[in-house]
Amino acid sequence: MDVLEAMARRSSTRAYTDQPLTEAELDTLFTAGLQAPTATNRQEIHITAVAGDNPILAEIEAHKNAMFGQNPPVNFYYGAPTVLILSGENAFSWTPIDAGIAVQNIALAAEGLGLGSVIIGCIKGPLTSDKAPYYAEKLGFPQGYGYQIAIAVGHKAAEKEPHALDRSKVNCI
């Protein structure tokens, strides 16, 4: 699939089968994320792959629910078999933008592989709270790195149409 087709077809997947990703699929996703351009070619983004049944995800979910008074019927990663958590250098001002570029590369690569994905920001609260050092250690972040963004990836259990384009959001001057 070419990149323009992947962009047109991609939508957020919120239902996954329990089929695990293959090593080749994971490697493709890692490569896509690591190939993303970064400011000053810093290459400061780190990717942590977490299996969907890892207890740390349930811990993060409980913390998120406690912080925001939520108890949704599904967890933040919608039961995906894999969650990729991107961390980056806390002291580098362009890290959040670089992480956004990397996560979009991963989302497009997932679509190209026929996988579903959903980009996750809702766990920022817990992962940047006073427990941030605890989570950083549990998730294997390099020293001086912090949570930036995450993406759940897996085989789709449901299809969803991509959103319609709203050309009123564009102007040329």
Image (cartoon, helix red, strand yellow):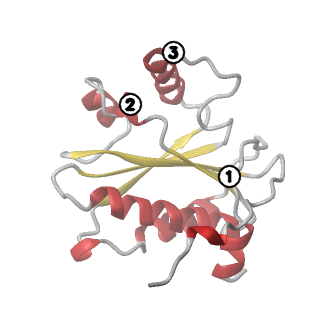
Q: How many marks?
A: 3
Mark 1 touches mark 3? (CB < 8 Å)? no
Position of residue 53 in the picture relative to residue 35 (left or right): right
Q: Residue at x 63, y 29 (%)?
A: 75
Residue 112: horizontal and vertical position, in percent?
69, 71
For badge 3, the amino acid type reads Gly
Which residue position is annotated with label 1? Answer: 12
99, above or below 74, in the image: below
145 or 48: which is nearer to us?
A: 145
Dot 1 or dot 3, earlier in sequence = 1
Marking on residue 50:
none
For badge 1, the amino acid type reads Ser
Spatial separation of the CA atoms under disc 1 and disc 2: 21 Å
Tell which residue pokes out farthest to the left in this image: 91
Which residue position is annotated with label 2? Answer: 125
Residue 117: horizontal and vertical position, in percent?
65, 53
> Disc 1 on helix, strand or loop?
loop
2 or 163: which is nearer to us?
A: 163
The N terminus - image quarter: bottom right
